[in-house]
Image (cartoon, grey):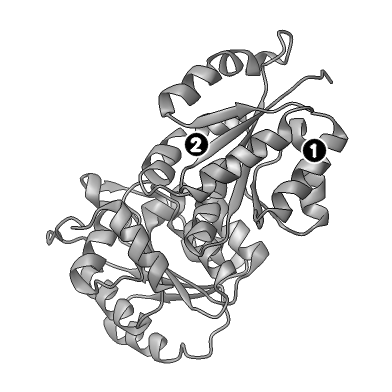
Amino acid sequence: MIRKEALEIVAKTCKNNPIVSANGYISRDLFETYEKPSNFYMIGSMGLASSIALGIALKKPKKKVFVFDGDGNILMNLGSLTTIGVISPKNLVHVVFDNSIHESTGGQPTHSSVIKIEKIAKSCGYTVYKIKSKAKLKDVLTKFKNFRGPIMILVKVEASKKISSRVQLSPLEIKRRFMKSI
Amino acid sequence: MNKNSQRLMFEFLNKNGIDNFVGVPDSTMKHLIYHAIKKKSIIIATKEEEAIGIATGMSLAKSPSLVFMQNAGFGNSISTITSLVQLYEIPLIFLIGWRGYLPNDAPEHTKFGKIQPEIIKSLGLKSKILSDSNWKKSCKWALTQLKANKPCSLIIKREFYD
């Protein structure tokens, strides 16, 4: 399964809940597959999607807040896993699309082919689901209705040559409609 | 700033709509941080960029925040300030501890303490330097900036040796 397919499967189950998407191809894939005002496309500030989502989750406890992260992104802000673990927001779902490469900068390797992100997340207090197939992914998502976060869905994906187009919205548009929608 | 001014400043900001104090501790502002901990309106992050991310999320959910840090951490945060806070016009107050302000501060702070005013200026981040006599006026200014959706900074000088 490639990231775009996995991302579309997860995004459709988010319905109208807020999604904070990491910079690079993840935000681009989300823009092409499940565009909606309650998506916060983080186009810069690599690594911070989970931190932004934590801030939203704490102030909007009745909404499920999703993070669409990448392995490169979360490895850049591992401290965020510890902060999320300490605060333990029940309404946070942290989805990591893990291809073990920095795909948008040319496919250079990340540490996730050696280091187990799921082990780090578990020791930080997350409930973790590691998924390798579409069927498993769909199956886990159906069991999600009464979850208690923080939850991490670590989806192993393959590299792909399909590149989504850039997010066609200005940062201010992204912010304004996101704030209005939540 | 002395102990009492820091306490009054925390109370003033908190009463005037600053719900969250998010950051990485600095001894220069430890009294303010102490009161924020007591009031349970604080999140201690692992890194300054992380703190800015959390405060940005809270701001998107319409809950105003102050981000506190030492100037060393402010140096770490420059790209986050340009590519998140300024790019999306996120209204945040930065409270920055000015190490290297005194000539004989610890050696690791000398260089950044010296170039800090120029960096803040080139970022285009408006700032006021706090003192025991002007803190209230400066905080009122910062709250006005926030209402206009503009990030800004308050600088707190390190005026003691340890």
Q: Secondary structure at mark 2?
A: loop
Q: Residues within 10 Å of mark 2 (few under 14, many from 20)?
A: some
For the N terminus of chain B, the quadrant is top right
Three-letter amino acid code at disc 1?
Answer: Gln
Q: Residues at marks 1 and 2, common chain?
A: yes
Q: Secondary structure at mark 1?
A: helix
Q: Residues within 10 Å of mark 1 (few under 14, many from 20)?
A: many
Quadrant in the picture for residue B70: top right
Image position of B128 (left or right of A140): right
The residue that label 2 is drawn on is: B77
Image position of B65 (left or right of B1): left
Three-letter amino acid code at disc 2?
Answer: Ser
Of circles 1 and 2, which is in front? 1
For the C terminus of chain B, the quadrant is top right
Residue B12 rendering spot, x and y as whole percentages: 75, 47
Q: Earlier in the sequence, mark 1 or mark 2?
A: 1
Above-or-below relation of B114 to A61: above
Task: Identify the residue at horizontal 53%, vertical 90% (top origin).
Answer: A146
Q: Chain of mark 1?
A: B
Residue A134 rendering spot, x and y as whole percentages: 28, 82
The residue that label 1 is drawn on is: B6
Residue B55 rendering spot, x and y as whole percentages: 55, 53
Does any portion of residue A158 appear in the rendered image?
no
Q: Nearer the viewer, residue A171 or A99?
A: A171
Residue projecting furthest to the right: B4
Residue A155 rendering spot, x and y as whole percentages: 36, 71
Task: Identify the residue at horizontal 47%, vertical 60% (top origin).
Answer: B60
Q: Chain of mark 2?
A: B
Q: Nearer the viewer, residue A122 or B43?
A: B43
